[in-house]
Image (cartoon, rainbow, N blue to C red):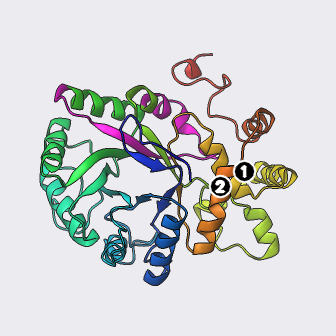
């Protein structure tokens, strides 16, 4: 396993993150424990979860279930907690009563304590804001986070789904308090969705945040979806939003799968390898439903994409600006 630092922090993390969003809704507790054990066997030490996880897309299920599954795994001992860099998130409401969500000082305190209880641990390595809260001032947020760190309940803080200017706001507010601030940003990033290259990636690089891409294969669309449909082995439904994206990009995805076949590699491995090659990316999040899915993902670490292949991928999935490879503000000019 390869390791790197999480942003400008001294924290050493694996170049692949184990995403746990399937634990509970899609993957049984027994299989979830097996996946986490196998992740450690492979040297993956960075796990990502959220207090909301446990619900399905339609919001059925139990909020907090995934953290409970992880907590029961930690409780089995064997140094599992000590070997794990644990990231969880807060923001989305965990109930229907006021102050059961978002980033007020009250909810930050309650949400952290609830996650610690479910996870059966006394500290969180990386506590991430799942989204921006436009109604809570940064002074309140950083004051509440400072207390958590002073109490030893949280070591590092991160963001998710932030715009570039949100990152700047957060970091300047932290600087005024002489506080470390954010060390990571978790964003949607893959060949089909490259919007963060405009402003989020530059902001993260400027402020020393590690970038943690989620949905690296865009819900399976970059994992060989057309081939799997032909073979009748597609595990995920291509309906609703996924079907609309597939219809819009079908020609590009078909060409992508052909390119991967010519390279002799699985499309999923190429999609992950492309992210690993991007400047500023710490580690993409993989969300295996089975041990076999996890084992397969590691191949991406051994794939090196040459300049010709990278150029072909840019041609198939061009960056979201007309001026070829430039970030903001140059991307907006001409």
Which quadrant holds the C terminus?
A: top right
Side (left or right) of 171 relative to 275: left
Q: Is residue 246 visible?
A: no
Give coordinates of residue 301: x percent, y percent. Answer: 64, 51
User: Helix, strand, or loop for circle 2?
Assistant: helix
Give coordinates of residue 321: x percent, y percent. Answer: 62, 29
- The residue carrying mark 1 is 249
Which quadrant holds the N terminus?
A: bottom right
Side (left or right) of 229 relative to 68: right
Residue 124 is drawn in which quadrant?
Answer: bottom left
Q: Residue at x 49, y 77 (%)?
A: 34
| Numbered range of the magenta stretch | 176-203
Q: Is residue 199 visible?
A: yes
Give coordinates of residue 163: x percent, y percent. Answer: 41, 37
Q: Residue at x 26, y 72 (%)?
A: 118
Q: Residue at x 55, y 55 (%)?
A: 215
Q: Hey, which residue is sitting farthest right in the picture?
A: 262
- The residue carrying mark 2 is 245
> Is label 1 in contact with label 2 (beta carbons under 8 Å)?
yes
Q: Is residue 104 above or below residue 118?
A: above
Give coordinates of residue 116: x percent, y percent. Answer: 22, 65
Q: Is residue 204 above or below residue 222?
A: above
Side (left or right) of 19 relative to 224: left
Query: Label 2: how many residues lie within 10 Å, few (<14), some (14-19) or many (20+)?
Result: some
């Amino acid at each position: 396993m390869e390791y790197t630092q999480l942003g400008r922090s001294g924290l050493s993390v694996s170049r692949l993150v184990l995403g746990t969003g399937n634990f509970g809704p899609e993957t049984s507790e027994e299989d979830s424990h097996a996946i986490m054990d196998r992740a450690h066997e492979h040297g993956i030490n960075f796990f990502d979860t959220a207090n909301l996880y446990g619900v399905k897309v339609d919001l059925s299920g139990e909020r907090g279930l995934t953290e409970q599954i992880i907590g029961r795994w930690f409780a089995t001992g064997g140094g599992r907690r000590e070997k794990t860099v644990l990231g969880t998130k807060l923001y989305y409401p965990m109930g229907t009563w006021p102050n059961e969500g978002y980033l007020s000082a009250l909810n930050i305190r309650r949400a952290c304590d609830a996650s610690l209880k479910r996870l059966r641990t006394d500290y969180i390595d990386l506590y991430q804001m799942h989204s921006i809260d436009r109604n809570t001032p940064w002074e309140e947020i950083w004051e509440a986070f400072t207390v958590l760190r002073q109490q030893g309940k949280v070591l590092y803080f991160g963001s998710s789904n932030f715009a570039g200017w949100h990152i700047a706001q957060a970091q300047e507010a932290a600087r005024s308090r002489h506080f470390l601030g954010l060390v990571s940003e978790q964003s949607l990033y893959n060949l089909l969705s490259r919007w963060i290259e405009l402003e989020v990636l530059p902001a993260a690089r400027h402020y020393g945040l590690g970038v943690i891409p989620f949905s690296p294969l865009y819900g399976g669309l970059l994992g060989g979806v057309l081939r799997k449909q032909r073979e009748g082995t597609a595990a995920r439904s291509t309906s609703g939003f996924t079907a609309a994206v597939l219809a819009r990009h079908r020609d590009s995805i078909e060409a992508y799968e052909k390119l991967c076949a010519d390279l002799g590699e699985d499309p999923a491995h190429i999609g992950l390898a492309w992210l690993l090659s991007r400047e500023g990316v710490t580690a993409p999040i993989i969300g295996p439903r089975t041990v076999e899915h996890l084992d397969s993902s590691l191949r991406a670490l051994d794939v090196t994409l040459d300049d010709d292949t990278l150029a072909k991928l840019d041609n198939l999935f061009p960056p979201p600006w007309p001026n070829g490879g430039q970030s903001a503000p140059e991307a907006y000019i001409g």
